[in-house]
Image: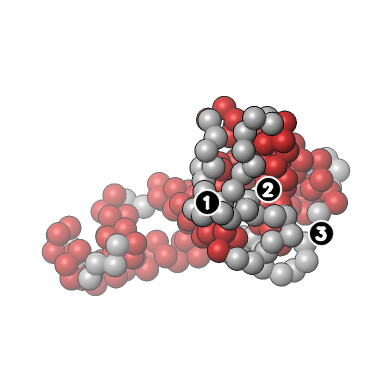
Amino acid sequence: MADTSRSLLELLCRPGARPADWDRLVAVCSRLLRGWLLRYPLQGADADDLVQEVLAVVVRKLPRFRHSGRGGAFRGWLRAILALQVRYFYRRRQNLPEPTDPQDENGPLLRPDQAEGELARRWDAEHDRQLMGRLLERIRPEFTPTTWEAFERSALHGRPAAAVGAELGLTANAVCIARSRVLRRLREQARGLLRE
């Protein structure tokens, strides 16, 4: 989750946290939560309501959140809140069937205490995709279109530097340098992030 560093969480737990810091957390969490909710047969308005309900719980309970120091602590906590809110949503609408894992008709919705398993791994993979997408969006304006294209084709699509260079009118070395510059900036942006 871009911008969801441990230091940001600590800042938000203190009295007088800045609105801009809360906005950063809300922006990152909202995107991730919507991605997770896409797996369920929900109407857009219902998904938006659930995101708001989860965020309200996060704002209320974040001062009591204690990071365990283990990978996945914040992400697991957020996922547990989402799972509970989805269950409450279905209970309030008694005519809807109890939610299941959309990938498995017989699989239950991830329980808050369920940290392992296929659904948890899929949610973690979605988190990682969201994080990478957010980081890439954030740094893209810092590079020329040619540098970005060289990076994207070589690093993200796995194309050989020589082939990318030939397509873009660059040397293979220039492609490697472009890829290296973007990856270095990506690592700088990712430093200190919670992979949770």
Residue 100 place in picture, x, y as percent:
59, 48
Q: On the image, which quarter does residue 123 sit in?
A: bottom right
Which of the pair 174/160 is nearer the observer?
160
CA neighbours of label 1 inside 10 A, class few (<14), some (14 to 19), many (20+) = few
**Labels 1 and 2: the sequence-earlier one:** 2
CA neighbours of label 3 inside 10 A, class few (<14), some (14 to 19), many (20+) = few
Residue lying at 22% horizontally and 71% vertically, measured from the top left: 160
Residue type of the residue flagged with mark 2: Ala
Residue lying at 40% horizontally and 46% vertically, measured from the top left: 141
Q: CA distance from mark 2 to mark 3?
A: 19 Å
The C terminus: image quadrant: bottom right
Residue lying at 37% horizontally and 68% vertically, measured from the top left: 180
Q: What numbered label is drawn on residue 66? A: 3
Residue lying at 31% horizontally and 58% vertically, measured from the top left: 152
Identify the residue position indicated by label 1 in the image.
Answer: 105
**Labels 1 and 3: the sequence-earlier one:** 3
Identify the residue position indicated by label 2 in the image.
Answer: 83
Q: Dot 2 lies on which element?
A: helix
Q: Nearer the viewer, mark 2 or mark 3?
A: 2
Residue 98 place in picture, x, y as percent:
64, 42
Q: CA distance from mark 1 to mark 3?
A: 35 Å
